Image: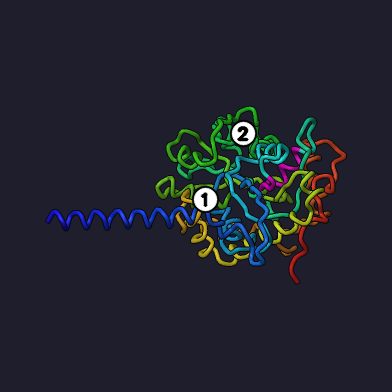
Amino acid sequence: MRTLRAVAAIGAAALLLTMAACSGSDDEAPSDTAQNAAGDALEKVTYLSGFGLFGRESYVYAAIDKGYFRDAGLEVEVKPGTGTNPNLKALSSGTVQYASIDLTGAFLEYGRAGGINDFTIVGAVQQRSLTALMALEESGISTPRDLENKTIGAQPGSVNQVLFPTYARLAGIDATKVKFQNVAPQQQPQLLASKKVDVITQFPVGKPGVERAAGGKKAVVLPYTDVITDLFGGAIGVSKKTAQDKPDQVKRFMTALLKGLADTINNPQEAGQIYAKFEKTQPAPVAAAEMTLMRPYVDLGSGLGQIDQARAARSIAILQGAGAIPDGLKPEDVISFNLIPKPAA
């Protein structure tokens, strides 16, 4: 018996050594994402999501999972964003190279005195604004007027909060009677469900996740576009330096990202499955439901990623008319139309 135990011990030790050797060789070998199909080294870039890492961001994971970025010569790291203003600061500081930015928020930031202007927009994700407020149906909140004397949980610097005074003015409510409480994106559904806040700043596509967090209770959505018309939604921003020094990289990034976007809005179920490979914030069915709800916002006939210059000018005019930004801002101040990939024929 002693001999058998000795043999077993030797065998186990040999197996551990073999496993360690294999592990060591894997660590030394280049990652399968370090080179593209042609054997060229990939350029590493960081992408900042718009607001947390929810199912609505599955298009960037699809572009990674399906090799679209790799084929474009890029290795993309995804990090959670916390709203337009913080994301723009990250671009300006060089912390990230690409970021999801609400285009309406970009106009507001660029146009205000002392605002951030070291960035440019290089393509759209949503053609219509997703900016909205959300409450539980049982709260009795169903119209903008119901927001007075209520507390809204919001990420500081998010376009929902920045645009709220304009929304309130046009909706005929007193913004001074509404309290904002600083809440990170990931915490908002839980705090709403536990009634720590009355309302949260959410996108309409986030409704399935909010209702799940609330144990199946129904949520009511108050879209900003009900009172502020012709506003764009999310877009992709880069620093002016990146746009000037690496225009080819920008076009390759956007082309790959838009392929992922096309796949996810055309096949939300697959999008949910891909999302679940990378993130655990939401289960695959909830992520798929978010992408299903997002589809109407993505392409209104102008082509994925496109930004109509005349419509952008109208959007700016609406914000100027509401007193949100001063006169003088032009679409080309904020948007690099020459860097937006042309839609596929």
Does the stretch in magenta take in 98?
yes
Which one is earlier in the sequence, the residue at label 2 or at label 1?
Answer: 2
Does the stretch in magenta take in 287?
no
Q: Which mark is residue 207?
A: 1
User: Disc 2 marks which amino acid?
Assistant: Pro
Along the line of sight, the residue nearer the viewer: 108 or 236: 236
Count neighbours of disc 2 (C-alpha within 10 A) and say few if under 14, some if 14 to 19, many if 20 or more.
some
Total numbered badges shown on the rendered structure: 2
Q: Nearer the viewer, mark 2 or mark 1?
A: 2
Farthest residue, direction top: 176
Q: Which residues are magenta?
A: 97-109
Q: Quadrant of residue 90?
A: top right
Along the line of sight, the residue nearer the viewer: 171 or 82: 82
The C terminus is located in which quarter? Answer: bottom right
The N terminus is located in which quarter? Answer: bottom left
Q: Is residue 176 visible?
A: yes
Q: Which mark is residue 156?
A: 2
Along the line of sight, the residue nearer the viewer: 332 or 200: 332
